[in-house]
Amino acid sequence: MSDALQPNAAFKKRVFSGIQPSGGLTLGNYLGAIKRFVQMQEEDYETIYCMVDLHAITVWQDPAALRRQTRELAAGFIASGIDPAKSILFNQSQVAEHAQLGWIFNCVARMGWMQRMTQWKDKAGKNSQNASLGLFAYPSLMAADILTYHATHVPVGEDQKQHLELTRDIAIKFNNDYGVEFFPVTEPVIEGAGTRVMSLRDGSKKMSKSDPSDASRINMTDDADTLAKKIRKAKTDPDALPSEIDGLEGRPEARNLVNIYAGLADMSVDAVLRDVGGKAFSEFKPLLADLAVAKLAPISGEMARLMQNEAEIDALLHTGAEAARAIAAPILEKTYEIIGMVR
Ligand code: TYM
């Protein structure tokens, strides 16, 4: 990559990230993404956060559920500390530029690149002939989400890393094909203890809203009793917790619970182990449950309060979409010009 193509040289420091409204918010979304979104809002960035409803329909969504989940996700963002006065917050389908640039990127990205995406392989599974074309093209739309704002930084959990590499490849190929330095080469921001929160039932699987077992995940809307019960039942091993990080080697469930503790407490894993090393899980789990309730109950309470006024959420999303469009439209227009469309 030439120096000229390095991110940020000629671009404003701008953050974009998105979450699918394809189910309820999980602790994985919170620790892996939203917590960092809130921090970046307070740092030296312009921040744009999106409920990616067009991505959600790459697999079947019941329309009424999708509407509810989109509003609930908006409530989750706000309850977690995203301030619509500081960040642009909106849902993707209200800003047509995403889909428009997505089409152009479908013509830049190569079939081979898409076929290598592990998330496509996982989600399409053995029945890929029956998966939607949208699911295959998903990462190209994701690149458009980011690049239609010339975003330079994208905070995500570990599972999105490959998609962000593809976003860089698309930007580089577009710039090379057309002999321009138009799209920035985005920086993934994958930081902290919460970038890979695992299932409570199986430490080798990601915590996910699509896991059929509700006991595998902590939902942001779980009440205190449910939360405590899920943590109490979380899979562990028979040994006590180690005092040093090396002692978590080969113990995925123990590592996961310690990571969750560190993420919730804003501590490093080392610091957590200094405090809890030597404790049995029967002692550690109640500490974790108390911490989780203390951190998450105010968020779920606020989400429930916000959900009582859907009109207010919808109005906020409209305002956010207008602000988003004001940035995206000129960038799309310039893109059309670069590629030779008569305007
Ligand atoms: P999604 O909706 O699956 O997840 C939203 C964010 O939460 C993170 N995340 C996790 N982090 C840690 N541990 C977990 N168990 C966990 N589960 C989810 C994800 O990494 C993500 O940051 N393709 C994206 C949505 C998207 C997007 C974008 C993201 C569409 N366009 C543009 C960034 C920029 C997705 O499906 O995320």
Image (cartoon, grey):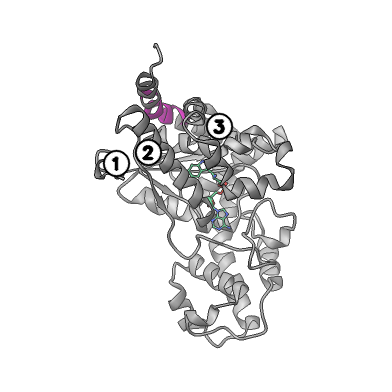
What residue is drawn where x is 70% and y is 54%?
Answer: 211
Q: Residue 227 at x, y = what percent?
A: 66, 64
**Which numbered dot is residue 314?**
3
Residue 289 position by quadrant:
bottom right
What residue is drawn where x is 38% and y is 17%?
Answer: 340
Residue hosting label 2: 172
Mark closer to the chain start, 3 or 2: 2
Mark closer to the chain start, 1 or 2: 1
Q: Residue 80 at x, y = what percent?
A: 50, 52
Estimate how packed mark 2 is, as few (under 14), some (14 to 19) or many (20 or more) residues with alpha carbons within 10 Å. some
The kind of residue tagged 2 is Ile
Side of 166 where 221 appears, left or right: right
Prevalent SS, magenta region: helix
The kind of residue tagged 1 is Leu
Residue hosting label 1: 5
- The alpha-carbon separation of the residues under discs 1 and 3 comes to 38 Å
The residue tagged with tag 3: helix, strand or loop? helix
| Residue 102 visible in this rendered orientation of the protein | yes
Tell me if the residue at label 2 has its CB under 8 Å from ligand 1.
no
The front one of 319 and 143 is: 143
The front one of 339 and 269 is: 339
Residue 238 position by quadrant:
bottom right
